[in-house]
Image (cartoon, rainbow, N blue to C red):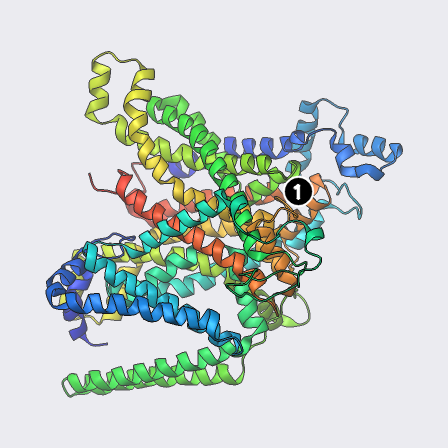
Amino acid sequence: MLRTVGQKLLHLVPVLFLVSLATFFMLELIPGDPAAVILGPDGTPEQYAQLRDEMGLDEPVLERYVSWLGDTVRGDLGRSLVPPVQDVREMIQSRLPVTLELAALAIVMSLALAVPVALYAAYRAGYRFDRTANSFAFGAISVPSFLAALLLVFFLVFHPDIVRWLALIAGLGLTAWLAQRALRLAQEYPAGQGRTRYLALGLGGALLVLLVTLFLWGNWPEFPRQGFVRLTSDEGIWANLRHAFLPALTLALTEAAVFMRLLRSDLISTLQDDFILSAKAKGMPVWRILVRDALRPSSFSLITVAGVALGRLIGGTVIVETIFNLPGMGTMIVDAIGAHDFRVVQAGVLVIAVFYVTLNAIIDISYAYLDPRIRRGRV
Amino acid sequence: MAESDILLEDAALGVTADGEAPTPPDETLLRVTIRPRRRGRRLLVGIGGIAVGLVLVVVGTMVLQDVSAVLRVGLTLAGFGLIYLGADRLGRFLFGEEFETAVWFSVFWLGLITLAAVFADLLPLAESKDVSKTLTTPTLLRPDLFSAHPLGTDRQGLDILGGVVYGARVSLIVSIGAVVIGMIIGGVIGITAGYYRGKTEGVVNVMADSMLAFPPLILLLGMVAVLEPSVRNVTIALGVLGIPTYIRLSRANTMVFAQREFVLAARALGAKDRRVIFRELLPNVALPVVSYGFIVLGALIVAEASLSFLGLSIRRPNPTWGNMIAAGQTDFDRHPHLVFAPGIVLFLTVFALNRVGDRARKLWDPRQSRL
């Protein structure tokens, strides 16, 4: 175990070194003089000389890299090159939480969406629900995130009435279906203690769905088109969630589709194992077999992929941050590119990459920890 | 849920674990047994579905003009749904149960987009680039097939259909160019690493890992931050993005083939490494690697559209799907066609590429089929 962890961490060192090298030499790719590009045509010679000095452009490249690396490791990311001059580290400190919150929320939402659908689809593999869920997932994967965001804005912000009516119809339909199913099962089931319980459970579920539907119909939430309220602000967590909901949902839709397909196919192979057969032979209820017995051994690759997705989302929130105008890392980088503030771009890219690499290493290690089958014997 | 359900669903639990298979084996079996009785009905549903669907599309797009937009869009969509259903049944009737309607629709769509992009200059499209030529054109026209502006016009009177067609050209040139760059560079490195193993492989792995250490969009942003946004530069940036994927893909495939007997035979006959790589491995590795290209193509089209959406790729006056959607954002509350016309085309293209890619991988990737 320790050996695996050590190997993983050792592998991290050259990767992080190359990452730092790549981010640093990004600046060298600029055609022409970086200082001239940053200042633009309006810069005065004094500003130009000052900027060259500030960026250390007159020193040899290697020396610049070493001093930059030293500063960065100590946490000093310098000050932005373009007015308003700010401390880059403070900028990142104020923006990283927004991005992290979005990414985490998106992962939670997509798991909440994907796991139940995958369970039912795997249980009825090949049947209508499974086929429908699969084609929806395939479609969702092909929707670019900015399109998904604009679709959500169009329907949930501009025309909420359409969705409200659809939700009402869908909710009532689901209630009717659940109630009808409960009644039918009760008729087929032999009389006795079990029958009353199943009937009560089914009708209770139907009632719950009805109540939720009616509650939503009465209190349809209004989502803001753009802007953000911080978690720490006075308006509280509800306002924060209302602002973060649409961006997070946008990200969650694609991820949920990926998770669903993955978990479904893992579940289907788990459901063929002998221990499932023995659970079935013992007469365990379906939900128990699916949730208690099959879900855990099927979720290893899901955990890995969800972890990787979390890392990718930290860099992938750029689009939704732009559309919903959120003060996160993505908008910071895009704005900095527009203003030719290369130092901010550099710092932002580096922070995200380091986050991503570290997270991936942690996932790798915890994967070995979770799944005893691969703990030893890694070739 | 009752226990009796489990017994009923035993067959369902016995399906093989193939996540991508749209029709698991036992279901095909089910269909085959039912087939003789259903054949006549299938033909009827097929022809009927296409006919009714066509009527609905015509009614939705042309006949009804003054009804609410929701109803028209709904009718048109229902029409397309029926056409799909009809084609599906008809296809199965004519070509057997394995006919994959969605894949054929995807191929058709990709062909259409490619032809439109290639022959864009010959098509009778209204002006979609030069604002000075559209001064007399009415702005923000709603889509109306069979008018001069089938998909409407934008705020400056530029034709949306023209923009979509020329945008397709940019998307295809950039993404195909990038896939070729990634495939050649990544493929060569990957095959070498997979064949020689050892130190070469270690170095290549670290390189690929550090390129994959940047989330894709961030790597792309880093590159376009320092490059001028032109077709060539965006292609190069996207190509670099694809290199690590191709390194891993071709390395993994090379490792599968390098252990096979024919490679051993070639080496036993005294073939040099270069000959083994180019004559024995390359032809075998090329097919799965190329088949994966469709999916990479789809991903790169999305990446390019995302960049143009952020205003960091090709800019106006040259229309791309991404910058058209970005420009339409301001008005799309009242004029959703500004966003959804290029959006639907983008979605359909990516969807079609994914679908075709999925099929191609199943056909040609040795790791997908059970050898």
Residue, x 38% and y 37% (percent of image)?
Answer: A4
Q: Quadrant of residue B193?
A: top left
How many callouts does the rendering have? 1
B186 and A215: which is toward the camera: B186
Residue B189 in picture, x, y percent from top left: 42, 26
The reply to whether residue A129 is visible in this rendering is yes
The reply to whether residue A291 is visible in this rendering is no
Q: Is residue B350 above or below residue B268?
A: below
Q: Horizontal placement of A76 versus A370: left or right?
A: right
Residue, x 44% and y 82% (percent of image)?
Answer: A168
B6 and B180: which is toward the camera: B180
For disc 1, the marked residue is: A345
Question: Which chain letter goes with mark 1?
Answer: A
Q: Quadrant of residue B121?
A: top right
Residue, x 49% and y 53% (percent of image)?
Answer: B346
Assess disc 1: are there few (<14), some (14-19) or many (≥20) residues with their C-alpha within 10 Å of its C-alpha.
many
Could you tell me which secondary element the residue under label 1 belongs to?
helix
In the rendered image, which quarter contains the N terminus of chain B? bottom left
Q: Is residue A313 above or below residue A154?
A: above
Q: Horizontal placement of B181 versus A89: left or right?
A: left
Q: Amino acid at mark 1?
A: Val
Q: Horizontal placement of B4 versus A204: left or right?
A: left
In the rendered image, which quarter contains the C terminus of chain B? top left
Q: Is residue B311 above or below residue A186?
A: above
Residue A104 in picture, x, y percent from top left: 51, 58
Residue, x 55% and y 36% (percent of image)?
Answer: B237
Residue A276 in picture, x, y percent from top left: 19, 61
Q: Horizontal placement of B366 versus A232: left or right?
A: left
